[in-house]
Image: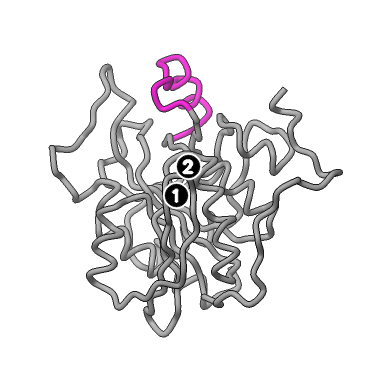
Amino acid sequence: MITDSFDPLSPAKINPFVNENAEAVDACILTFSHVIEENVLRTYDCGKIGEFYFATGATPVYRLLFGGKKFAFYKTYVGAPACVGTIEDTFSLIRTKKYILFGGSGCLNREIAHGRVMVPTSAYRDEGTSYHYQPASDYIDFPNSTVVQTFMKENGIPYVAGKTWTTDAFYRETENNIQKRKADGCISVEMESAAVQAMCNFRGLELYAFFTSGDLLDSPEWDERRKEGQIAGTQHDLGHFDIAISLAKHVSESDG
């Protein structure tokens, strides 16, 4: 069974390459959005640190300076296995313990406005990747959720905190499963965070995550809650990169 997959007793056949001479950065910021990536490259004085490769091609990793700190930044892939794999591949290019993950999520509570920042406190593990990094459990906690919430409060950023549902099956978010997760207290659904937190726990990394409240599943019919071409309030919202880079500065200046 997949829930028996965690094996702490024997080594993996293939391991990420850890480059001890890689460039040190204060934190690394991940986006899923090509719109945000393009805007960051236009707006900031970015230099390419390097790139790693999947069968889909090269993934460039950039450096940028902000508030006297040096950060890495790159566009990752949707889905738990690929997202986790890209973080592990960054070990060949950068040295940092702090990763900022942000992106869009489905909303499971109609009272939460479109575009609202959502801070996950724990994640329901309805994917496969996390079970290879941590013993089986229904939920995985986000230990740095309080750090992210404190940052939001101190900066006057409206947000809502709660559990999230991480699933591999975008097209199998059925009504019965939605109701189960809602009953558990989940307010969002996405495809990566449980796995990323499990990997970070395993590798000794610090994860700081937040989402943008997007499409609504808590309604009789699926509601995309955006117009064609809309950027504001979506996973492509440029203002949410501003939140991410300010959060990166915040955590790089603290022990959190």
Between 83 and 49, the one lying in front of the other is 49
Judged from this view, the residue extending furthest toward the bottom is: 68
Query: In terms of secondary structure, what is the magenta stretch mainly?
Result: helix
- Secondary structure beneath label 2: strand
The answer to whether 254 appears left or right of 10 in the picture is left
Q: Does residue 176 show up magenta in the picture?
A: yes
Using the image, determine if residue 50 lies above or below residue 126: below
Residue 115 coordinates in the image, percent (x, y): 27, 46
- The numbered mark, 2 or 1, whose residue comes first in the sequence reads 1
Looking at this view, name the residue that lies furthest to the left. Answer: 228
Label 1 is placed on what type of residue? Answer: Val
**In the rendered structure, are the residues bearing label 2 and label 1 in contact, judged by CB atoms less than 8 Å apart?**
yes
Q: Which mark is residue 119?
A: 1
The residue shown at (23%, 31%) is 224
- Looking at numbered disc 2 in the image, what kind of residue is underneath it? Gly
Residue 4 painted magenta? no
Q: Which residues are magenta?
A: 169-187
Expressed as whole percent of the image width and height from the top left, the position of residue 57 reads 42, 50
Whether 105 is drawn above or below 159: the answer is above
Residue at (63, 60) in percent of width and height: 205
**Residue bearing mark 2:** 162
Which quarter of the rendering shows the C terminus?
bottom right
* Disc number placed over residue 22 in the picture, else none: none
